[in-house]
Amino acid sequence: MPAAIECVLLRPGREAALARFFTDLAAAGDDAYFHPHAGDVATLRVIAEQAGLDLYVVFVEGEAVRAYGLLRGWNEGYAIPSLGIAVHPDARACGLGSLMMEYLETMARHRGAPAIRLRVHQDNARAIAMYKRRGYALTPENDGARLLVGVKPLGDVA
Ligand SMILES: CC(C)(COP(=O)(O)OP(=O)(O)OC[C@H]1O[C@@H](n2cnc3c(N)ncnc32)[C@H](O)[C@@H]1OP(=O)(O)O)[C@@H](O)C(=O)NCCC(=O)NCCS
């Protein structure tokens, strides 16, 4: 029986596991779609050690990272955070992506953010389907761009 999946912040000590996750994403060709920052241990250590409001979250199963999500921009003073998400190639299509989205959107709402912003490659059909289903309005970043910008307002849910 596999271990339970836990949702934890990226803290010092988890860099190597997350670096392996980035390596596996690259081997699957997903680095074309997901490259929020470098995925080497040294870069991840800097992120894990930094203070501030930006959120870097991992779903771990034992030592293995199954999904990674981030909300950033608060540290730079933006009111609307930018979201990034990836699920391990071996763990897809069972709801972890949706669960990570739900967590990040809930945290943004909890922090009082008026909206969430993201960018997605126009060929990334799975991610686009997920974002549309979750209420993101997608528009081209600029003329001829291969990237779409998504925005989801976080109004009252009541
Ligand atoms: C996009 C991604 C995060 C989805 O993660 P996931 O855990 O497979 O997603 P879920 O199982 O929660 O499914 C969520 C939605 O994704 C879409 N989706 C998931 N698997 C899919 C598939 N095989 N084919 C088409 N759409 C799919 C669907 O819209 C699905 O909604 P549904 O379950 O109501 O049909 C994952 O494919 C991934 O990590 N891709 C590589 C990195 C990436 O592209 N990140 C986004 C950068 S903008």
Image (cartoon, rainbow, N blue to C red):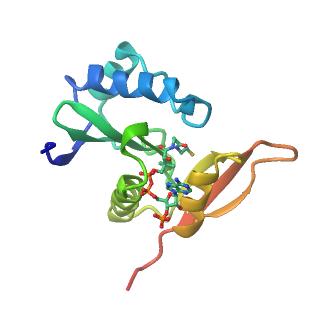
User: Of all residues shown, which one is farthest toward the bottom?
Assistant: 158
| Percent of width and height locating residue 99 | 35, 58
Residue shown at the point (32%, 40%) measured from the top left:
66
Q: Residue at x 16, y 43 (%)?
A: 2
Up-down relation of residue 158 to residue 25 (above or below): below
Residue located 47% across and 30% down the image? 25
| Location of residue 150 with respect to 21 vertically, above or below | below
Which residue extends farthest top? 42
Q: Position of residue 128 (x, y in %)?
A: 62, 56
Identify the residue at the far front of this view: 1
Looking at the image, residue 49 lies above or below residue 106: above
Residue 88 in sight here: no
Seen in the image, is 133 located left or right of residue 88? right
User: Who is closer to the viewer here, 114 or 92?
Assistant: 92
Residue drawn at x 40%, y 18% as measured from the top left: 43
Quarter of the image for residue 22 reads top left
Viewer-proximal residue among 114 and 118: 118
